[in-house]
Amino acid sequence: MDRNQFIGLILMFALLAVYFTWFAPDPPVPEELTTQTEPVQETIAEVSSDTTTVIPDLPDSVQESFNSQKYGAFAFAAGAEERVNTIENEELIITLTNQGGRIKDVILKKHKDYLGNPLVLVDGSKSKSDLLVDHNGKKINLSELSFKPSVKNIGGDTTQISYVLTNGTFSIIQKYLLPAKGFEVAYSIESKNLNTVLNPTDVNYNWNHAINRAENNLEDGRYNSNTRYYLANGDYDELAERSTEFEDETLGEQVKWVSFKQKFFTAAIIANASFKSGYVSQTVDFGDTTTVKNLSMQMLIPYSDFANGFGARYYFGSNNYDILKKVAPDFEENLDMGWGPLPLVNKYLIIPIFHFLERFFSNYGIIILIIVVVIRLLLAPLTWKSHMSMAKMRAMKPELDEIKAKHDGDMQKAQQEQMKLYQQVGINPVSGCIPMLLQMPILFSLFFFFPNAVELRQQSFLWAHDLSTYDSIIMLPFEIPFYGSHVSLFTLLMTLSTILYTWSNSQITTVQGPMKTLQYMMPIMFLFVLNSYASGLTFYYFVSNMVTFGQTVLFRKIIDEDKIHALLQENKKKNVNKKKSKFQQRLEDAMKANQEAQKKGKKKK
């Protein structure tokens, strides 16, 4: 380097130093949050995922000047190299970084993704949390500042890691407590003399979270992931789960917890008191096949809570009902169990039976088989009542055929006489349907339970490698509309067994006309609908069909239809002059009125 080059370089650095000291503009303040929904009273700041801003190849004095402009009294903590600490228990491996003293990565030790790799629930390369405080009217992102870590054991079982940011005058301490087992991490913020450096405005807690792809079926994962929240007033709500469009909601009420729920796992924060208000959103990047959904929360921590001590808990774990219900009020809502009365059936019948059987059996295919038997035994009285009703109808088939022949072409008169016959012999024509309807809540509950049961995830049985997703015996070189490009054998077996059961019933029932053909359409429809559903569900339905078929054969052997027919004939003699019930009278009157209306219509033509 010659003399002229050296002088030029010195002048260049001198100009840069002068510029950054006296003329450089203030660093840009993150834009205020704007949404199309009702605005929150305080501003919730959005921040980028960039780390500490460092101007490369500049003298220390220039860098210090820049940090002083951007961070003010916090400049002493800017620009340090990132260092990480790892803590773990029986279920979790958590990596924390000194940059912001925050959680960076979370791995679930007992779970793998669909490729067999460790399941990363929180991925620091895609997800980031931030704390933004107000210093002299500017938002300072604490995640861009370096905290000093300190790790120690408490009571031998609990690991505590503290991250301290202090200049001797004021301090901010973030603490994380991880017990020896479990999925919760206690989190607290302590401080000292913050009033000397901060404006007393609410603190922004932001968490942008990209859900890593953990399951083979990406589309199904996107349909079963969303942001959920619970307000301090007891109201639970969520963003549209099946939506792949941008969804957001401004939360003007105090917020107790917010969760990032995916099909089998959840990452969440639960405030000990409450967040003052917040904003949540979600969207899908279809160009990124490694990410299911991008979820975000931006919450306000009251300044008084932040300055005097803020407490919360993180949950990083599976959507296991027995675990979720102990975390926080309504936290079990992170497990989809259906709508209306269906969650009650799952909570108080299906799940207790399932978890009881887990104590004795490790093979989940066997557990499902036993559940079929237990459910069929519980429903046996209803099934028996339904079969008895059908047996009575079959016993009266000769008389019903006579009525039909007698009033050939006049359906209304035939129906009136049939109703009269039913009254005389003591048959309720809808009694066979009621037991079947009472069984429907259980069947529908299982429709939600099996596809969302994390216990079935990656559990194999026979040819199914994973009972929580579809089994595939053949991959087609093309895709069939509404069916897919794979063939599920359990779904095929379920369909065939349903058709067999339907055919068997049609041989002994009085169903005639188009209904006899239409009853075969439902199994064909389910062949398409359930082809991509959990193999645990279709296996259950298949076994249930076979058990039901066996029950039908057994009941037919037990029930003496000749004896039933004789009993019905005795009833007919006794009830010849029996007064009609109010229901039967109203039904008969309605049929007569309909018949007269049709006659008038024919006369007008």
Image (spheres, helix red, strand yellow):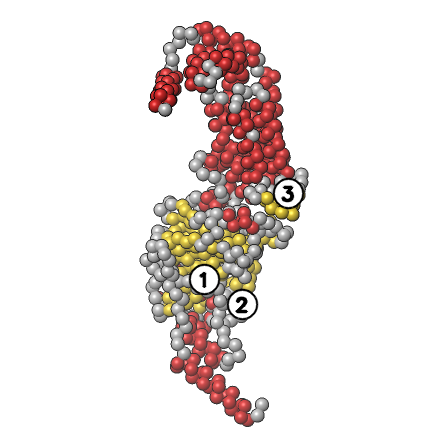
The earlier-in-sequence mark between 2 and 1 is 2
Disc 1 and disc 3: Cα gap in Å?
A: 43 Å
Give 292 or 324, whichever is nearer the viewer.
Answer: 292
Pick the residue in front: 66 or 200: 66
Residue 406 appears left or right of 464: left
Q: In this view, does 441 lie above or below 59?
A: above
Callout in the foreground (2, 3): 3
Left or right: where does residue 480 sit relative to residue 25? right
* Label 2, label 1: how far apart the Cα atoms are: 16 Å
Mark 3 lies on a secondary structure that is loop
Q: Where is residue 148 in the image (x, y as percent from the top left)?
A: 50, 66
Q: Which of 283 and 225 is in front in this view?
A: 283
Amino acid of disc 3: Ser
Which amino acid lies under the numbered mark 2 shown in the image of this protein?
A: Glu
Of badges 2 and 1, the one in the foreground is: 1
Q: In which quarter of the image is the N terminus?
A: bottom right
Which residue in the structure is indicated by mark 3? 472
Residue corresponding to mark 2: 82
Q: Is residue 300 visible?
A: yes
What mark, if any, has residue 130 been given in the picture? 1
* Percent coordinates x, y for residue 360 in the rendering: 61, 35
Q: How crowded is mark 2: few (under 14 residues within 10 Å), some or many (20 or more)?
A: some
> Looking at the picture, how far across and down is residue 546, in whole percent?
61, 28
Q: How far apart are marks 2 and 3 (CA)?
A: 46 Å
How packed is label 3: few (under 14 Cα within 10 Å), some, or many (20 or more)? some
Kindly indicate whether the residue at mark 3 contacts the one at mark 2 (C-beta within 8 angstroms): no
- Kindly indicate whether the residue at mark 3 contacts the one at mark 1 (C-beta within 8 angstroms): no
Mark 1, other Cα within 10 Å: few <14 / some 14–19 / many ≥20? many
Residue lying farthest bottom? 3
User: What amino acid type is highlighted by mark number 1?
Assistant: Asp
Contact, mark 2 vs mark 1 (Cβ under 8 Å): no
Regarding mark 2 in the picture, which secondary structure is present there? loop
